[in-house]
Image: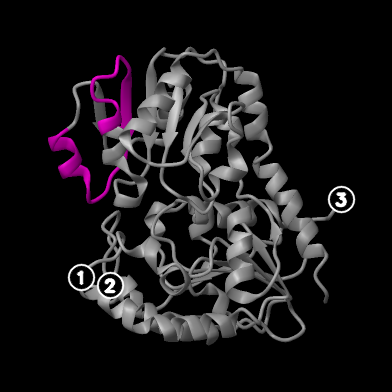
Amino acid sequence: MAQPLTERTAIVHDWFQGFHGAERVVEAMRAGLFADGNEPDVFTFQAARELLPPELSARIRQESRLANLPGIRQRGHDPGRWRMLLPFMPGYFRRLDLDAYDTVIASSHACAIHARPREEARYVCYCHTPIRYAWLPDTEANRVRGPAALGLRAARGWLRRKDLEASLGPDVFVANSTVVRERIRTAYGRDAAVVHPPVDVDDFDPHAEKEPGHFLWAHRLVAYKRPQVVAEAFRGLPHRLTMVGVGPLAGELRRDLPPNVELRGWVSRDELARLYERASGFIHVGEEDFGITMVEALAAGAPVIALARGGALDIVRPDEDGVLLERAEPASVRDAVERIAARDWDRDALAARAAEFSRERFVARMLETIEGVRR
């Protein structure tokens, strides 16, 4: 069994816009990979520190001064305009002074991969995905629009060349899912170990009382998450749907909600856990690199309806953990809801599946992978 890290270590992460999936990976690394008394230093481009756990915020040693300029910086949940500085990010990460560190871990879905440790240091890249703006432009079509989209389109070739150059640096890549492993092979020509992100599965009780016919959707209200598709699927169904999320589509979605669909905004972690536990099914029909919410639903004893793309293929086994859809359209979602509602699901089996993605397994696999890197 690999031992906790005792050497001085830096974690380099793209940015902390909130406390979402990638940020939870960094926190699990901070809390789980290191021997007592050996906390890592964290470097990033931008950090909304007030949205992070205090223990993680306290370990951030450096962020870009550019990201904190007035009119650019993020204020609370208001994202600010710092992403407009993407062309400056590769250079920022390359110039970080990491000479004091024996191990460097890049947590990258954009530019953290550009970090340059000293030659003798171990360098591991935990890759959430190769940068989408360069390698997966079609997936960004609904996320970035207007002048920003035009700028990214013009810079795509440059970003791709720089990213490919940066991919030569890490000693080893770790992918957060099988589909990301394939992206790494396609983009960089390199293999990767698959270590799924950590999920706090013990936060959920699979034996809590369910509300029959009550389904849950919990994501950001953005186009690729398909909130309107899911809401429309419930129109006329004898079942209820609770939607939890904030984002730019909130107003448009709320104006045309079916009467059996409730839209909530932000809720606390405890309240969200109770919603998972009461739900008789969970819906996730956006394509994700992994998809932590699907595992959380399973941990709460709720079968999952998911699109048969991306990380869902690593999580949901058809007819064992839920239903996989070939298309994200109202009719397909409606049929899947009826299938979920018509069957008694084994909650213990669902929770056992979720346990395969626990924080403890993440830490053990990461330590094994880091230990195997040459010194």
Reading the image, the residue beneath label 3 is: 1
Type of the residue with mark 3: Met
CA gap, disc 2 and disc 3: 47 Å
Does 32 sit above or below residue 342?
A: below
- Which of the pair 80/55 is nearer the observer? 80
Does the magenta-highlighted stretch encompass residue 234?
yes
Type of the residue with mark 1: Gly
Does 255 sit above or below residue 40?
A: above
Does the CB distance between marks 2 and 3 fall below 8 Å?
no
Q: Quadrant of residue 182?
A: bottom right
Residue 342 x, y percent position in the rendering: 47, 13
Does the CB distance between marks 1 and 2 fall below 8 Å?
yes
Residue 82 x, y percent position in the rendering: 31, 72
Point 58% across, 59% down: residue: 180
Q: Is residue 116 left or right of residue 265?
A: right
Does 60 sit above or below residue 294?
A: below
The C terminus sits in image quarter: bottom right
Q: Quadrant of residue 283?
A: top left
Does 322 sit above or below residue 34?
A: above
Reading the image, the residue beneath label 1 is: 146
Q: Is residue 191 left or right of residue 262?
A: right
Does the magenta-highlighted stretch encompass residue 140?
no
Q: Which residues are magenta?
A: 232-256
Q: Is residue 190 left or right of residue 277?
A: right
Point 87% across, 50% down: residue: 1
Q: Residue furthest left?
A: 255
Coloured how? one colour
Reading the image, the residue beneath label 2 is: 149
CA gap, disc 1 and disc 2: 5 Å
If you read the primary sequence from the N terminus, does the residue marked by circle 2 or circle 3 appear first?
3
